[in-house]
Amino acid sequence: MGRPVTESPDSHAWSRQLEDALAKVMQRTDATVGMFYLLPPGEQVLRLALLAGLPWSLISPWASVSLDTATPVAHALREDRLVWMNGQEEIARNYPQLGTVLPYDFVVAAAPVTGGEIRGSIALAWPAWHRWGPSPEEREAIDVCCRRAALVLRRAAAGGTSFSFDRPRIMPPVRAPEPEPAQATAAYEFTERLPTGCLGLDLEGRVTFFNTAARDLAGGGAGLLLGQRPWETLGWLHDPVFEDTFRKTLVTRQPSSFTTQRPPDTPLAFALHPDDRGISVHVTRAPGSLEAEDTPREQPTVLGEPVGATALYHLTHLAVALTEAVGVQDVARIVADQLIPGFGAQGLVLLTVKEGRMNVVTHRGYSAEFVDRFDGDPLAAHAPHMKVLAAGEPVFLTTYAEFQRTYPSAPRYAGRNAWAFLPLIVSGHAVGSLVLSYDRARPFPPAERAVLTSLAGLIAQALDRARLYDAKHTLTRALQTGLLPPSLPRVPGVDAVARYLPAGPGMDIGGDFYDLIRCTPTTVSAVIGDVEGHNVHAAALMGQIRVTVHALATAGTPPGVLLARTNRLLTELEPGLFTSCLIADIDLLHHRARLSTAGHPPALLRHADGHTEILDLAPGLLLSIDPDAEYPATDVSFPPGSVLALYTDGLVEIPGTDIETTTRHLAQQIAQADIENLDALADTLVEQAQQAGPRRDDIALLLVHSR
């Protein structure tokens, strides 16, 4: 169910300041919906922290938003800019998942909150009639909110405050003025005199008020309405149209209406009128009513948590999200985030089959101690999730008594009273099991059972694909890292560290490589390179190039000549891939370095006084373009205390940002760093590159410090 913000004594005060900032920007811009997301340090998933103007049940599919997904809040943070979408068509075109689950006409904006260790995004929404594009006043209000929130987060981080995530803080609507008792009585009497039915719904859709006319028009059982959602209480309203109209009215803040028939033959018209605190519903007989006044009314069926429009939208969102899931952990996170709010479950356990045993992949709503007892059990065990997998049929247990009768020896967790045990099977072979549990007894109507059974098949297929991906991913990563040096040689007078970080989501591997080669007792060669492409071919070519470069450097070949010879060899091999490479020959005795480049990002040189420059090297073509290409060398001073930084473009490429700007920023980071701890500097540079946004390329980094 996502993991929104849990208040600690320290984080509570900061959360209230963030809440105040969000409330003020909503007031200044007349926004009807506001959300605040936080990006925990080192993570790539935004967590919903504050929510205003919409119920949690409606927005829960976006409790957790990966930075690389197509959503406004992730887009704004990735590109560090304001995102503004005007209406349903533009939203659906740019953010299909959002348009699928909220297919209504509204305006949405998102803006980044940056500048500290903890970052985030805000999102605002307005009715469709709101102006197209932000006004200067709205831009200023949003900018003020983001700057204020960034300051709050910086101060919280400086004070050692950490935010944990369990559930978002729901901001209450602005309270309406309290009526005088006489006014309240007069208003009640006024509604009682009307022939029109009057219903009051809160933002969750629960009835807060109804008059006598509404009770009469609703028929028998209407007395059960108070505190309930009408579409869950009245059997004849158990149709997605009522719930969907309610959702649409909440999101768009526009009046809407629909007509339905109360059995046996009474057409009723419903008109919904929203504001920030709820919805007023008028109920009238629709023209052409056939019912006589004395026609007996059918008793409505009381349903337990039926499958409604919200659940169906959750499932649609889940289906779309699963198509984009990569590994098993991706599938597990998506399933848990969507199924719990979609079906109102209090607990979930997802298990997969591996080597004849069941392994817990993820769980929600259970203690680790309880779930650990099932992790690693053999398939022959008698636990319920094992038995349904062996039988190949789901089991729905509606009460604890039924659970006891069916599985008398199975443990029960913390007062759970209903369960759905779903086998995950693809093409006849077992993939795993999914368990949903509920605090209250649950009837599991036939429609809900059918949806859950179908959903289990969808999850099984996604898990099967994900396991195949994980296996190939592990193999290809092992191939790539096996081609890189296991460690750097120890060279007197030099400290050197390297980092390699594979790209983000995706099956393929990259061709980034680095090396440090001891040529003579007083000379060393530092090498960095990047083969075009992300596949096994690129990795194999990278291995060939690294071996070639290593052999030539060990033989004392100058860097320019080395690149020229490597280039001719690659051209003859016709690999079909281009390669960038940069080589630095370092003379430790004379404190000099000679560098040559083949189209590689420029090296950075930090001098002993801290000044860091971007080295302007004589250019050379990428390898394997022209067999006769020449690679001139550039000499620079490399006295003790200097640091040479070589890197691949994955370290400095940020979508939407000029690479020259990010390279200058990297130089500033190195200039301000403590070079006595080279390992810490390398870790910091890589971490900051990760936090800058989702990466589509590998990162290789080599730092050489002359002591």
Image (spheres, rainbow, N blue to C red):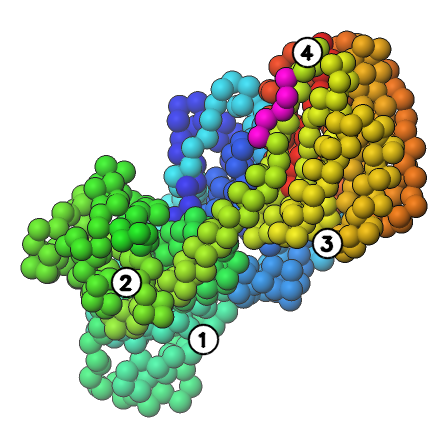
Dot 1 amino acid type: Phe
Residue 8 rendering spot, x and y as whole percentages: 39, 27
For label 4, the SS is: loop
Q: Please check the rendered image and state whether residue 488 is part of the magenta-colored stretch, yes or no.
A: yes
Q: Which residue is mark 2?
A: 423
Dot 4 amino acid type: Pro
Residue 28 rendering spot, x and y as whole percentages: 63, 42
Discs 2, 3 touching: Cβ within 8 Å: no
What's the mark number on residue 343? none
- Say whether residue 166 is left or right of residue 560: left
Dot placed on the residue nearer the N-terminal end, 2 or 1: 1
Quarter of the image for residue 294 reads: bottom left
Instruction: Between residue 226 and residue 228, name the one nearer to us.
Output: 228
For label 1, the SS is: strand
Which secondary structure class fits the magenta region best? loop
Which numbered mark, 2 or 1, is in the foreground of this view?
2
Q: Which residue is mark 4?
A: 492
Discs 4, 3 touching: Cβ within 8 Å: no
Discs 2, 4 touching: Cβ within 8 Å: no
Dot 2 amino acid type: Pro
Residue 599 rendering spot, x and y as whole percentages: 84, 40
At 78% across and 37% down in the image, what residue appears?
A: 581
At 31% across and 87% down in the image, what residue appears?
A: 265
Dot placed on the residue nearer the N-terminal end, 4 or 3: 3
As measured in the structure, the alpha-carbon distance from the residue carrying label 4 to the one carrying label 1 is: 82 Å
Q: Let me know if residue 642 appears in the view.
A: no
Q: Which residue is mark 3?
A: 133
Q: Which residue is mark 1?
A: 258
- Find the magenta span and give its range: 486-490
